[in-house]
Image (cartoon, helix red, strand yellow):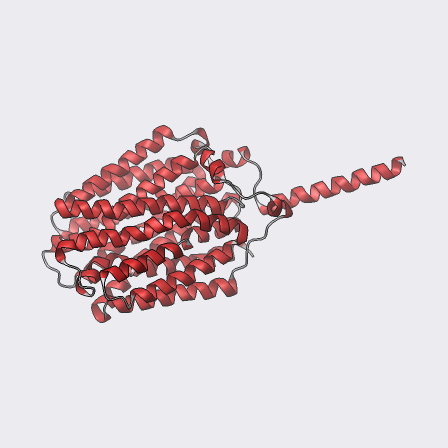
Amino acid sequence: MNWKVVLAIMTCNVVLMSASYTMLIPFLPLYLRNDLGADPETLNLWTGAIFAISFAVCAIMAPIWGKMSDSKGKKLMLIRSSSLIALTYFCGSIVQTPLQLFLVRILQGFAAGLWPASLALTSAYTPKNKIGICMGVMQSANICGGILGPLFGGVLAEAFGIRTSFVIAACALLAITLVTIFFIKEPPKSDADKKAPPASYRELMKRDGILILLLATGLTNMVILLLQPIMTLYIGVLRGTEENLMMISGLVFSLSGIAGAIAAPIWGRQGQIKGFYKTLVIALSAAGILIACQFIPSSLVPFAILQFCVGLGFSGIFPSANAMVINLTSPIERGSAFGMMFSAQQIGGAIGPIIGGVIATFIHLSYIFLLSGLTLVAIAFMVYLKAPASMRAKPQEVAKDRPAQDVIDSLKREAAAEIKAEMEAKEREQVK
């Protein structure tokens, strides 16, 4: 398949994936309180636990699914994840208690892995000199879904209830499953790649740059999930009323997404030119400072303006990290590498809601923004001080240092080896 066709299809899939997720997640606290009867005294703890359990299970399963993506096929992992997530969303629409929703989220953790599988499949078709822009486009698609999800989710929740949003999200994931089955082909493997031993997680962990990327993305996701569960509640505090809260929250959520959708391809292009290490450090620093500033406003309008600006910074973090992972690994390792990356993010996602729930129980919600911003700035300093030379190198230099890893290059090597063998055989015949 042509890489542009693959990118176009996967972009549409990612938009649906992200929209279905963000259609539901911001409103889970209200779903727990209004539909499932959670006690006000335990609402924050239930919210943190229900957010965290899915991430915890996914953190365990992601490396397993990643390795299977390399050995059994990336397309198969896409179908597995999208179909099972569709099932969990449907189950979420019929639960009656917080405990039942908790159990559904456990199943969702087993089903997860759609995003890393999408990245691994897309990267297998993408030329090396287009990695930056492709990762930027994929991140932009993820963010665009993040814009549409809260908007539609807020409107649907106000008009028909959150249960309807769960059903529509399930239909979106079913559509991804069908598109993958009928329109996506498994990336081809060379004979050399088929015979190569499966990637070892121990070897990947020892590779320069991988560990620091795992730490940076895991901690960043922890910060994101610190904020997400309490955002809707804090917007209600700033407004002083809960009238049309879900719709207003959806609009505020979408502001950072709009900014991110605009900025993500720009970050990707700049990373390809100037180096993904630089864009990662700058994006982490900018997002951290802006989130810390959200501690200051006491009304909704300046908070919403800062939310837009936060999206400009956040949108450069994950495309830069994903592009560096691609540059540091071969196609037959990328399922495992993205599985590890996704696992690190899920561990952060499991810790974040619990910390956020505890903080929200004992201190004012605004302090979570200050702590989150300072944490991101600290991550930026960690990357700046600890990053090895392989991370600091520009993409072109990394590509020269490591062995050729594209399927086309592998085929060329095989053809050259066959020609050499034939020539040697002819020379032996002539000698005889």
Question: Observer-nearest residue: 181 or 126?
Answer: 181
Question: Observer-nearest residue: 137 or 202?
Answer: 202
Q: Residue furthest left?
A: 240
**Rendered residue at 32%/58% (across/down):** 21
Q: Is residue 147 above or below residue 340?
A: below
Placement of the N terminus among the 4 image quadrants: bottom right
Is residue 120 among the parts visible in the rendering? Answer: yes
Percent coordinates x, y for residue 408 in the rendering: 61, 46
113 displayed left or right of 351 = right
204 displayed left or right of 300 = right
Percent coordinates x, y for residue 227 in the rendering: 23, 48
Q: Residue furthest bottom?
A: 160
* Residue 218 sits in quarter: top left
Q: How many marks?
A: 0
Is residue 309 among the parts visible in the rendering? Answer: no
Percent coordinates x, y for residue 387 in the rendering: 39, 31
**Rendered residue at 18%/52% (across/down):** 44
Placement of the C terminus among the 4 image quadrants: top right
